[in-house]
Image (cartoon, helix red, strand yellow):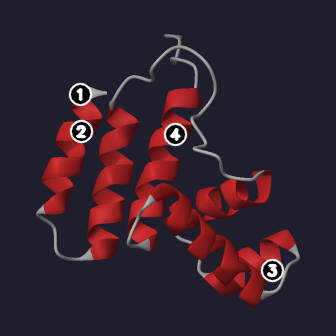
Amino acid sequence: MHARRILQELAGGLADGELRARFLDRAAQKIPPVRGGGPKRAGLTPREWQVAQLTSRGKGNREIADTLFISERTVESHVTSIMVKLKFASRARIAAWAVEQSAEREPPATPS
């Protein structure tokens, strides 16, 4: 987890939220996954986890709503709930967190 903390500190210097999220996404892919259980979902509901994952893929509220067959307002509520539960101030932070959690879940790649 030390490498992820360093990435967060580095990303903190990027003023552009979208650039910061892309940086964290790409950098997190270079860090070997942590072995062990599934992602730490920090008390999110399964639907909130889905919203967080779609947010990490750069989807907006309308796209998330269409994908999950829910209203845009419901997506807004889920995003707000995620931010409150995780004490985050932005969608970019949700996206970075979801990428990190997904990276921890993936098994290590095996050489061909």
Mark 4 or mark 3, which has the lower sequence index? 3
* Mark linked to residue 2: 1
Please, what is the three-letter code of the amino acid marked with disc 1? His
Left or right, 2 with reference to 26: left
CA separation in Å, label 1 and label 4: 14 Å
Crowding at dot 3, Cα within 10 Å, few <14 / some 14-19 / many 20+, comes out as few
CA separation in Å, label 2 and label 4: 13 Å
Q: Position of residue 79 (x, y in %)?
A: 60, 73
* Mark linked to residue 101: 4
Please, what is the three-letter code of the amino acid marked with disc 3? Asp
CA separation in Å, label 3 and label 2: 34 Å
Left or right, 77 with reference to 3: right
Mark 3 or mark 1, which has the lower sequence index? 1
Q: Are marks 1 and 4 in contact (CB under 8 Å)?
A: no
Mark 2 or mark 4, which has the lower sequence index? 2
- Residue at the spot of label 3: 66
Residue drawn at x 56%, y 39% as measured from the top left: 102
Helix, strand or loop at mark 4:
helix
